[in-house]
Amino acid sequence: MPKVRTTPDLILLAVTLILVMIGSLMVFSASAVWADYRFDDSFFFLKRQLIFVSIGLISMFLMIQVDYWRLKSLANIALMVCFGLLIIVLIPGVGLVRGGAQSWLGIGAFSIQPSEFMKLAMILFLAKYVSINQKYITTWKRGLFPILALIFTAFGLIMLQPDLGTGAVMVITCMVLIFVAGARVSHFFLLGGIGLAGFVGLIISAPYRLQRITSFLNPWEDPLGSGFQIIQSLYAIAPGGLLGLGFGHSRQKYFYLPEPQTDFIFAILAEELGFIGGTFVLLCFAVLLWRGLRIAIHAPDLYGTLFATGIIGMIAIQVMINIGVVIGLIPVTGITLPLLSYGGSSLTLMLTTIGVLLNISRHIR
């Protein structure tokens, strides 16, 4: 085992804390009006977000101290627990329904989203499995097939909720991890064809997904229906200009943009802080991804490289999808912006995974 350094990657730690601080401020600004109207407490969402931040930071600093090699022995258990939770959440009367998806389990006054934790469990398991069986990764029968069967079983359970956004992030992240591990490019072309056919099937099976695509191409076709969110998001970004309207002075949060503290928080940020504020946040994410890639490249073993690759891939994919939705480049998918959006499961997961990255950084060559 390589010698442990005294400190983790301080640049990664600093940029993470900066993003969490900005996220907490923006959650308050974006949600204050809605929280005051619904709960008679402007600080309702902020107080809950700070609880999630505290739990996430504790988890992150614990992960910094626990050698990532020890997590290897927990991979199978973590995956089985997450599979169990994905099944439990589908039981009528047990899983909570929000936004048309039965994706949450209630725990007291709070709730967790098992599909979020499945993403980390899948990354952990694949990093372990592939690092042990890398010599088979170029084969179909002993290499890719068992892995894909596992991935798409989890994807199928997530789609039963249904939650296409989270499922897509998990699948794409796993594909990135497998590609880095050395899988054949020809296999990816085959998987791409299968994935395209499956995507078309998912659209046909649920008309609302087709509406999202058509509204993405022309949101003004149904401005009060399927195109409403995209139009209101663009209405938030456009007035921001260079410097923005000022913190707390968003207009779209006044019941125009639905629940702006979650998926569309970047739109409110751009409206209030302008092009400069939005660019600063994107640069922070760029630094985070750069440090994560550096950790993956210099990890002391294949397991560490794949684990870090999966984590940084998951974060990058979520950022690209969320920003793409907010600025109208891709259809609405319901993906939160890492470290900024309101949400316990997502924020806790992200801070925990960054804690693992920071731990790997203590061992890099």
Image: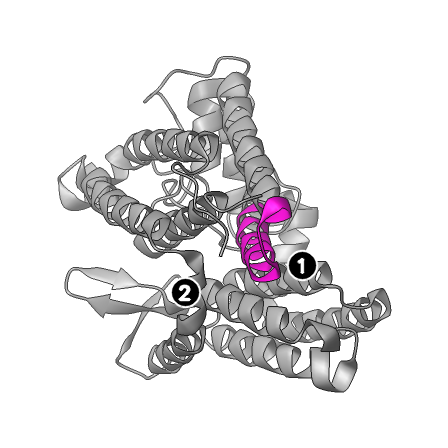
Tell me the mark number nearer the camera, choosing from 1 and 2. 2
Q: Is residue 110 above or below residue 291?
A: below
> In percent of the image, x 65 and y 69: which residue is there?
203
Judging from the image, what secondary structure is the residue with disc 1 in? helix
Q: Residues within 10 Å of mark 1 (few under 14, many from 20)?
A: some
Q: Residues within 10 Å of mark 2 (few under 14, many from 20)?
A: some
Determine the CA span between mark 1 and mark 2: 21 Å
The reply to whether residue 116 is visible in this rendering is: no
> In percent of the image, x 40 and y 77: which residue is there?
86
Q: Magenta stretch containing residue 311, yes or no?
A: yes
Q: Is residue 245 above or below residue 267?
A: above
Q: Is residue 129 above or below residue 8?
A: below
Q: Magenta stretch containing residue 233, yes or no?
A: no
Q: Are marks 1 and 2 in contact (CB under 8 Å)?
A: no
* Most common secondary structure along the magenta stretch: helix
The reply to whether residue 76 is visible in this rendering is: yes
User: Looking at the rendering, in which quadrant would you find the C terminus?
Assistant: top right
Instruction: Single out the residue that lies furthest toward the right.
Output: 186
Left or right of 251? Residue 109 is: left
Instruction: Single out the residue that lies furthest toward the bottom.
Output: 141
Highlighted range, magenta: 296-316
Which residue is label 1 attached to? 176
The amino acid type of the residue labelled 1 equals: Val
First of labels 1, 2 by sequence position: 2
Q: Which mark is residue 191?
A: none
Left or right of 142? Residue 215 is: left
Which residue is label 2 attached to? 71
> In percent of the image, x 50 and y 37: which residue is there?
232
Q: Position of residue 91 (x, y in %)?
A: 33, 84
Q: Quadrant of residue 338?
A: top left
Question: How many numbered dots are placed on residues in this image?
Answer: 2
